[in-house]
Amino acid sequence: MQKVSVIGLDKIKGRLIARMMDLEAVQLTDQTEKLTEDFWAENTVQDGAQDQVTYFENKISRSSQALDIIDQYGELKSPLFKTRRIISKEEAASIPSQEIATEDLIARLIHLNEELRSKRDEINKLDLDNMMFEPWRDFDVPLDQTSTQTVTTIMGVLPIAYDPAGAEGAVKSITERYVMKQVNEDKTMRYLAFLIPKENEEDILATLKDQGFQALEMRSYKGTVTENILNNQKRRIKLQDEIDQIRDEIKELAAQKEHIEDYQDILTVELDKKKTRSKLLKTKKTFYMEGWVPEGRVEAVKNLLDANECYYEFSEPQEGDDVPVMLKTSKFFKPVEAITEMYSLPAYGTFDPTTIFALWYICFFGMMFSDACYGLLMVIVLGVVLKKYNLEGTMYKMVKLLFYCGISTTFWGVMFGGYFGNLFTVIAETFFGKTFKIPPLWFDPLDDPLKLLIISIALGVAHLFLGLAIQGYLYLKDGKVVDFICDIVLWYTTIIGLFLWIGGGVIGGAAPVIGKWMSIISIVGLALTGGRDRKGAGKLVGGFSNVYNITSWLSDILSYARILALGLATGAIAQVVNTMGALAGGGIKGAVVFLLVFVFGHLLNFAINVLGAFIHSARLQFVEFFGKFYEDGGEAFEPLRKNTKYIKIEESK
């Protein structure tokens, strides 16, 4: 990265920001902190246009609301993968001219949604009223006539656990002039009505409340309960018809969804331009900005700044600068960046291992999944997806990476002889009474698991040694020769020596003896140099800790046994599925059963083991490989760009 500092005339600021968005090569940094310094505070102020930011945010919020309404009621089919539509610059430039029509469309959708909400609320109230009315159907007195100048009616509920005699006694203790009627009863409540003197209403309500009675206020309703229920039902039907009409209109308006999407993206670009200004400092006639530019894009940025008559200066990052990171990977290996990004980007100035571990990841995935038919299925399906859909960003990287993994899976499936497990052998024996088997090009792990274990461990050691070699390279690059010898060379000789000591008998000759003394000398070296940067007892503790790390190395090496475990699991489960499918025997019935078991069983096996291969291949990189050298913590390079969600603006279609 190169740091760029720019001074320009205020009148070209908007045009320059727009062109930087097209260029996608400059990440601007916030300059507000400079205002704490006297020079900057005396001569500049923070740029910005908060009123315009708020204006565009409100418009975007309304357009998002309209799109949500269409998604909810428009009944449009969603594509399998959401991709941006490609439009030309000329088409993009014409979108603002449709602002009035699009705003009217947005306003109409929001209004229709508010009407829907209002009518639904009314339906809910009608339903609640009818639930309240239902137990009172036999109460045939008009509700608006339940009170006169001298008497009034109290209607309410009493929990079934309470004795109605208690409620009646409470009323009787206040007045002898009353009538009590139980209108209805269900599992939880009794529905009671009291006709009482109006002058005693407050006292009676208070004493009834002490008895568990809860009064219901129904005097605001007109007509009898039955009439209210019927009227509510009619009103509900009418409201539902109106809701259906509104939904039909929204479905018609949904055909114009793309207009709103285009409009929102243009608004988002304008909003980003306004927000960007807050990162700048300005005087009355000039502005000042700083940012980061990848080395490969410096010339393009210089040309842009020259064209806009700006004064600028490029410089190297200084210690303490928060420098963003952009991975520099070849086109073929770029999909593997998704794995690096999933973990954490490397810190700026450190080593990016993406290109190096790419083939290891793909290889490990294929060995773990290791079924040629599963792999071929991945290649075909993902190949069609890549061809049909204009995928971008992380989605493209993941799909392309899995496409590569599908090729690897197919290769290792052929090498190990896995074709939906032993599908063709089972079909031949069950339905044709024949013996048929596609032999592995190398060997069958289910017949010789020890061989695969040895291969897995060998690959693991090579993988770990590569990680250690990278750390050694970084030491030598920084001139740390002593660290290279003590922390790299001694570990190489220790691990190699232990392998020769333990397994040298297979090689024969003096290999075990050489391994024994190599490992002993190396371990002594680790003990003596492990605490070289410490003082006093720390040297002893550091040395012991360094030697103890042998157990960590052994643990890391054994972690690669998961290649064996997952490889066997894929093949074994596939064979079990085939055997279960064949239990019904031959014939039409057997074929139907076999087909059902085959589809369900292999889909399940595919789903479980493709996930396992993906996760555990990544784990071998993150924990074992990265653990030997990787320094994470990098922040992704985020240049000024048109962050559109629905459209991709290009020079031409």
Image (cartoon, rainbow, N blue to C red):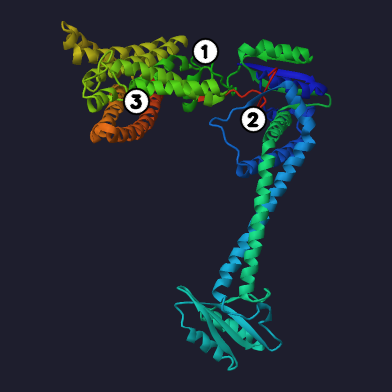
Q: Quadrant of residue 483?
A: top left
Residue 29: image x %, image y %? 66, 25
Residue 653: image x %, image y %? 68, 19
Establish if 157 lies above or below 548. Answer: below
Judged from the image, the secondary structure of the residue bearing numbered disc 2 is loop
- The mark lying in front, picked from 1 and 3, is 1
Q: CA distance from mark 1 to mark 3?
A: 46 Å
Q: Amino acid at mark 2?
A: Tyr
Judged from the image, the secondary structure of the residue bearing numbered disc 3 is helix
The answer to which of marks 2 and 3 sits earlier in the sequence is: 3
Q: Quadrant of residue 234?
A: bottom right
Residue 415: image x %, image y %? 30, 15
The answer to which of marks 1 and 2 sits earlier in the sequence is: 1
Establish if 263 lies above or below 417. Answer: below
Q: Amino acid at mark 1?
A: Ser
On screen, residue 595 versus residue 150, left or right, reads left
The residue where tag 1 is placed is 330
- The mark lying in front, picked from 1 and 2, is 2
Residue 151: image x %, image y %? 66, 88
Residue at the image position 20 percent from the left and 8 percent from the top: 514
Q: CA distance from mark 2 to mark 3?
A: 60 Å
For the view shown, which residue lies furthest in the front direction?
Answer: 588
On screen, residue 637 versus residue 408, left or right, reads right
The residue where tag 3 is placed is 538
> In the image, which disc is placed on residue 646?
2
Judged from the image, the secondary structure of the residue bearing numbered disc 1 is loop
Q: Residues within 10 Å of mark 2 (few under 14, many from 20)?
A: some
Q: Residues within 10 Å of mark 3 (few under 14, many from 20)?
A: some
> In the image, which disc is placed on residue 177?
none
Residue at the image position 47 percent from the left and 23 percent from the top: 382
The quadrant of the picture occupied by the N terminus is top right
